[in-house]
Image (cartoon, grey):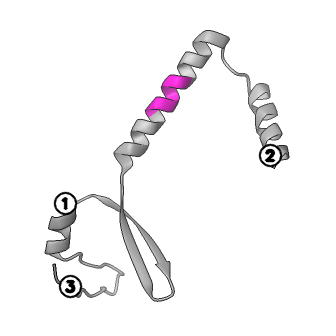
């Protein structure tokens, strides 16, 4: 695939060329994270379903822990957070 040129609009919008969208299987509403350094911009697809799956796993682990040991109190959580912060 050849390099493509695009133009930024006055509102900061950039069109990703059709061939690039096709190659990367980008669809409308896909989220991209944008990094910028000096004169370089990098855009990477942000895979939100992966984040959602990870959050669901964390919730499941938390529920299993609560079922085995009881629910953590706010005092327990504060104590653990404090211990981690002081361990740095």
Asked if disc 3 and disc 2 are in contact, CB closer than 8 Å, the reply is no
Judged from the image, the secondary structure of the residue bearing numbered disc 3 is: loop
The residue beneath circle 3 is: 4
> Which of disc 2 and disc 1 is earlier in sequence?
1
The residue beneath circle 1 is: 25
Query: Which residue is found at the position 66% from the left and 13% from the top?
Result: 70
Query: Would you call the spot at circle 1 few (<14 residues within 10 Å), some (14-19), or many (20 or more)?
Result: few
Q: Name the foreground residue: 50 vs 13.
A: 50
**Above or below: residue 30 compared with residue 79:** below
The tally of labels here is 3
Q: Main secondary structure of the magenta part?
A: helix
Query: Which residue is found at the position 37% from the left and 70% from the top?
Result: 43
**Residue 85, which numbered label?**
2
- Left or right of residue 39, residue 64 in this image: right
Quarter of the view holding residue 12: bottom left
Query: Would you call the spot at circle 3 few (<14 residues within 10 Å), some (14-19), or many (20 or more)?
Result: few
Which stretch did the figure color magenta?
56-61
Asked if disc 1 and disc 2 are in contact, CB closer than 8 Å, the reply is no
> Which of disc 3 and disc 1 is earlier in sequence?
3
Quarter of the view holding residue 34: bottom left
Q: Residue 83 in the image: x percent, y percent?
A: 82, 38
Q: CA distance from mark 1 to mark 2?
A: 42 Å
Judged from the image, the secondary structure of the residue bearing numbered disc 2 is: helix
**Residue 39, which numbered label?**
none
Query: Would you call the spot at circle 2 few (<14 residues within 10 Å), some (14-19), or many (20 or more)?
Result: few
- Left or right of residue 80, residue 27 in this image: left
Q: CA distance from mark 1 to mark 3?
A: 17 Å
Looking at the rendering, in which quadrant would you find the N terminus? bottom left
């Amino acid at each position: 695939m050849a390099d493509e040129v695009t133009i930024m609009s006055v509102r900061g919008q950039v069109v990703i060329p059709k061939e690039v969208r096709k190659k990367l299987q980008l669809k409308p509403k896909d989220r991209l994270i944008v990094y910028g350094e000096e004169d370089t911009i990098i855009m990477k697809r942000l895979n939100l379903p992966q984040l959602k799956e990870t959050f669901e796993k964390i919730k499941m682990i938390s529920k299993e822990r609560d079922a085995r040991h009881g629910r953590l109190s706010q005092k327990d959580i504060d104590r653990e957070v404090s211990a981690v912060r002081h361990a740095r």
